[in-house]
Image: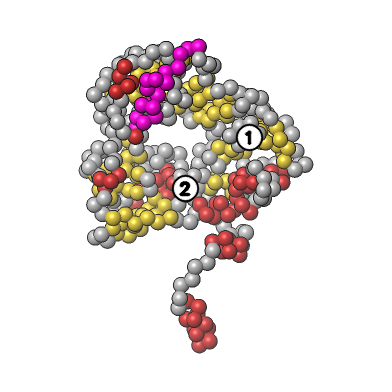
Amino acid sequence: QESEEYQLAEAALTRLSRTVPLDLILEYLPQDLPLETTEGLQTDPPMIFVSTQPAVLLSADSEPVYLPVEGQELKFVLNANWDVLREGDDGAHYLCYQNAWLTAESIEGPWRWAEQVPPELAELPAGSNWDDARACMPQNLKQSASGEVPQVFYSNVPAELLLLDGEPQWVAIAEGGLSYAANTKQEIFRVDDRVYVLFSGRWFSADDLEASWHHTVTLPEAFQQIPETAHAKSYIRNSVPGTKEAWEAALMASLPRKAEIVRGTEDALALDVSYAGQPTFQPIEGIAVEMAVNTSYQVLKYENAYYVCHNAVWLVGENPQGPWRYADKVPAAFAAIPPSSPAYNTTFVQVEKSSPQSIEYSYTSGYENAYVYNNTVVYG
């Protein structure tokens, strides 16, 4: 039983709340504090393209899905990372690149400068969805002789582009054999004759930039020599297994963030869940939950209800297109979505509590990012 002195001391220390800097708390936490890890995460390397000249990565989530632009015969690719438009069902494709237009007969290319574009491009609907495309029209049309055509790499599987301004310019870090490519925005490193790249918290290595890539969880000791401060690559220590910064980053990723949502404000989301054709759902392996496969939104079906996770908030509706209302709870089955599913990140979004006025949600950084710690890919 606690002594009277202990109870008096506890009462004195806990009577008032105190604000303590997070950095101070981290400084005194034990470095061997265990962090939750996740088994079964996808570690296969993406398709990695390399270019030493102007280039873009055009990717589609599976096969491209075409939907009509409202009020026009133009169609756009719903599941692409760029604004790609097509004339009708089998016409030319158009892609906006740096206030100019590229065109190709097929989304796979080859792409060239467009000498003319369909007049409908100047009539795209107003709104943020088409702001970039509308900015290309029409006075900025670039002719075919206006400069080097950027190389367009197309992929319908996960892919990354390493874009360098010419051949790699290696700059040494300390004296341990580690160097980095200074003429790129990507994280490209070299130790001796092996190259390392960092994508979304995962490290991949190869014999050279054009060789086959492999996922790696063990980095050479030379990475530990990246200076902690005052260096162009100091921030990379957050993703180097074994560093204090990586441990702190993984710990921070596990801390939940909370948001209180006022009921009745769903209209402010302007959530318009559209599908390529009729809504199509496929089962998620191992659980009684289905996921929509022909929309850019994360829509899940469970029994007779539909749920969409949008900006770390759950909404629910009786139909796959809505209308949507904030969800007071989500099915327990959602917690069992496996790491192999594209919907796995939604498992990091929780409904904490609700009242007649509001609902409180929480999420950890696993919803948005991945971190590497102690030779393991850790989702917050």
Kindly identify the residue that appears in the image at 49 percent across and 83 percent down.
Answer: 7
Residue 213 coordinates in the image, percent (x, y): 61, 30
**Which is more toward the observer, 281 or 356?**
356
Q: Which residue is mark 2?
A: 366
Crowding near the residue tagged with mark 2, few <14, some 14–19, many ≥20 C-alpha atoms within 10 Å: many
Give, as a three-letter code, the residue at label 2: Gly
> Which mark is on residue 115?
none
Q: Is residue 130 magenta?
A: yes
- Residue drawn at x 64%, y 43% as measured from the top left: 233
Q: Specify whether 250 is left or right of 343.
A: right
Helix, strand or loop status at disc 1: strand
N-terminal label among 2 and 1: 1
Left or right of 200, for residue 206: right
Above or below for 308 versus 125: below
Q: Position of residue 293 (x, y in %)?
A: 34, 32
> Could you tell me what secondary structure mostly forms the magenta stretch?
loop
Q: Residues within 10 Å of mark 1 (few under 14, many from 20)?
A: many
Q: Is residue 136 magenta?
A: yes
Picture residue at 45% right of the left edge, 78% below the top: 15
List the residue tagged with mark 1.
Answer: 188
- Between circles 2 and 1, the one closer to the viewer is 1
Q: Residue furthest right?
A: 175
Name the image quarter holding residue 68: top left
Q: Is residue 306 left or right of residue 77?
A: left
Q: Secondary structure at mark 2?
A: helix
Measured in 3D between alpha carbons, the distance from the residue under mark 2 to the one under mark 1, in whole angstroms, is 24 Å
Residue shown at the point (37%, 20%) measured from the top left: 138
Q: Amino acid at mark 1?
A: Ile
In the rendered image, residue 40, in percent from the top left (x then y), is placed at: 50, 42
Question: What is the magenta range?
Answer: 129-145
The residue closer to the viewer here, 40 or 188, is 188
Asked which quadrant contains residue 323, the reply is: top left
